[in-house]
Amino acid sequence: MAHDVDVAEQFEKHLNSPKQTWLLGAGVSFLANIPLMYPLTTRVLDLARNDLFGDDAEAIRVLDFITSDCGESSHIEHHLTHLGDLISVAERSRTGGIEIGGERIGKEKLIEVHQGLVQKIAVTVRWGFRAARQNAAGEVIEEARIGTDGSSIVDISGHRKFVEAIFGANRAGLDFVRTPVEFFTTNYDTLIEDALAFAGIEFQDGFVGGGVGFWNMRNYAANSTTRAIVSKLHGSIDWYRSHTGNANLLRVRYGDTYPGEGGSVMIYPQATKYLNTQRDPFAEIFQRFRQRLAQGSDHVLLVCGYSFGDDHINAEIEIAMSSGKNQLTIVAFVDEPNDELPLTLRTWLLEPWGQRIFIASPKGIYQGSNGPFFPITDGKRDWWTFDGAANLFAAGLPKDVQEAMA
């Protein structure tokens, strides 16, 4: 049997694995009009400077310091982590603050800026934002689109199509043999949970309750009717924790008069004590990710919309793949924007376990260091996109690949 046909058959087999774990990144929500990380950063900093802190010189000084100290390649999560570190330093300081530009900035101001940035992230993600498009000459060819309360531009259709493909009628037979599909996402939006609900797919996400729910680890385990489990690795726009009183992590509805002011949206776990990580679910969520990746043979990690830019997540994947007792397979749907795969993937393909990595890119299918197989001469494959991955699960491999396998 030709090598390319053998790779295609293995690739198809992994798409039909009874034990599937998905890692979804920001790219899957781009067509839903939720910005990628760098446009999100630009938008949030713009709102912070011109709207939230326009008349607050101290806050602007903090923002200027954070953005310059983190460097040009940093994004909003780096800024939040850096700010969280400064808050931790201020807590240990005898003065209760830090020095920026020769002037003391108190811990309370640092916390205010941190909370303000998180709130602007939540607003941007909740209602949607599409940055303006420019041509090579720098001329605006498409104006920015800004969603607002009452006029959201967020589009859930892509997520609904994806969920219907994963759990659709043509894959119903898998329900008798497969474990619940687990979705781990770095996204703050609620589109995957909402799409599962629209499709009538019973899932667990660690919360108990209805419109307002509370975090409880016992509700994180599958029961006999659970078909999916959702884990938000970097938090969510509908997570809320009060700064005083009840310390429970809540999932809330936006716009309600309760639980009221004096709380915070829970986004991104900084590596400091500022967010009091012993109370947060992030340690439990990453532990679940670690344990899930370690679950033996015939287990596939499918990756879509993720650029392999999170060292913490990459480390967990690498540890699982390197384990001699683990036969985890990776199927990655990724672009090659600079005519090459992401650096992390290129490095992994050279590892002894690299042959257990399959990649669907615009150029074709890779297995380990071999490929791409099944390139097309009149364009590029679209199966690496979120929509393209949904089409693969709904309709199977493209006609030309199926014909080669016949």
Image (cartoon, rainbow, N blue to C red):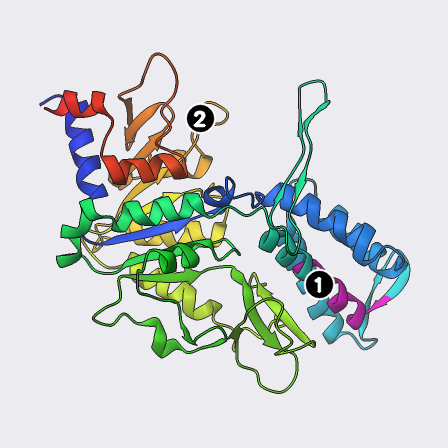
Q: Element under label 1?
A: helix
Image depth: mark 1 or mark 2 in front: 1
Q: Residue 257 lies in what quarter of the image?
A: bottom right
Check the image and report above or below for 157 versus 66: above
Residue 335 shows which numbered tag?
none
Q: Which residues are magenta?
A: 105-118
Check the image and report above or below for 36 versus 59: above
**Apparent side of residue 59 relative to residue 207 in the rendered image (left or right):** right
Q: Element under label 2?
A: loop
Q: Amino acid at mark 1?
A: His
Write the residue at 54% across / 71% down. 252
Foreground residue among 186 and 292: 186
Write the residue at 88% across / 66% down. 104
For label 1, the residue is 114
Q: Estimate the spatial distance between the alpha carbons at disc 1 and disc 2, rounded to whole Å.
A: 36 Å
Q: Main secondary structure of the magenta part?
A: helix
Task: Pinpoint residue 283: horizontal percent, then vertical percent.
Answer: 46, 69
Write the residue at 66% across / 77% down. 260
Q: Is residue 106 visible?
A: yes
Residue 340 shows which numbered tag?
2
Q: Is residue 17 visible?
A: no
Foreground residue among 405 and 347: 405
Q: Amino acid at mark 2?
A: Glu
Which quadrant would the N terminus be assigned to in this image?
Answer: top left
